[in-house]
Image (cartoon, rainbow, N blue to C red):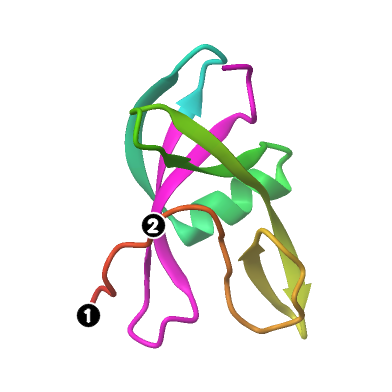
């Protein structure tokens, strides 16, 4: 596995409406393997991306290895910031290529 980004997002928990990510589970990308995982707040990840850190999504396949998903970026819509893997113009976070956890109430 070559280095994909600084951090790889493997999971996320959305708010009760399903429009905002509350927290993400990330691992540091060491190039040949992923480091230990930690839960980070949405705000922390947005700040890190704006500071130049690179994030992407990934999913574990049936063989126990990871497949890169999409790069993650921050986009501003009407003064609000959103985590996105694709610019879809909607006022909600979207991260593709991983399994989302159940909605946290």
Rendering coords of residue 48 (x, y %) = 61, 44
Q: Position of residue 105 (x, y in %)?
A: 22, 80
- Which of 10/7 is in front? 10
Label 2 Cα neighbours within 10 Å, binned few <14 / some 14-19 / many ≥20: some
What's the residue at 56%, 59% (across, down)? 96
Q: Name the quadrant containing residue 77.
A: bottom right
Q: Quadrant of residue 92?
A: bottom right
Is 26 included in the stretch rendered in magenta? yes
Closer mark to the observer between disc 1 and disc 2: 2
Tell me which residue sits at (57%, 15%) in the image: 31
In the rendered image, residue 58, in percent from the top left (x then y), is placed at 51, 42
Q: Secondary structure at mark 2?
A: loop
Quarter of the N terminus within the rendering: top right
Q: Is residue 83 above or below residue 28?
A: below
Element at label 1:
loop
Q: Magenta residues, as a range?
A: 1-27
User: What's the distance in space between the residues labelled 1 and 2, CA to CA?
Assistant: 18 Å
**Residue 99, labelled with which disc?**
2
Which residue is under mark 1? Answer: 105
Residue 57 left/right relative to 90: left
Residue at x 57% of width, y 71% of height: 93
| Residue furthest front as drawn | 62
Report whether 95 appears left or right of 63: right
């Amino acid at each position: 596995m070559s280095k994909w980004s600084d951090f790889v997002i493997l999971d996320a928990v959305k708010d009760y409406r399903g429009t905002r990510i509350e927290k993400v589970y990330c691992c540091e990308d060491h190039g040949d393997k992923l480091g230990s995982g930690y839960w980070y707040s949405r705000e922390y990840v947005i700040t890190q991306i704006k500071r130049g850190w690179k994030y992407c999504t990934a999913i574990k396949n049936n063989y126990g290895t990871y497949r890169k998903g999409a790069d993650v970026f921050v986009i501003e819509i009407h003064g609000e910031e959103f985590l996105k893997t694709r610019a879809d113009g909607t006022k909600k976070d979207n991260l593709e290529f991983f399994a989302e956890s159940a909605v946290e109430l």
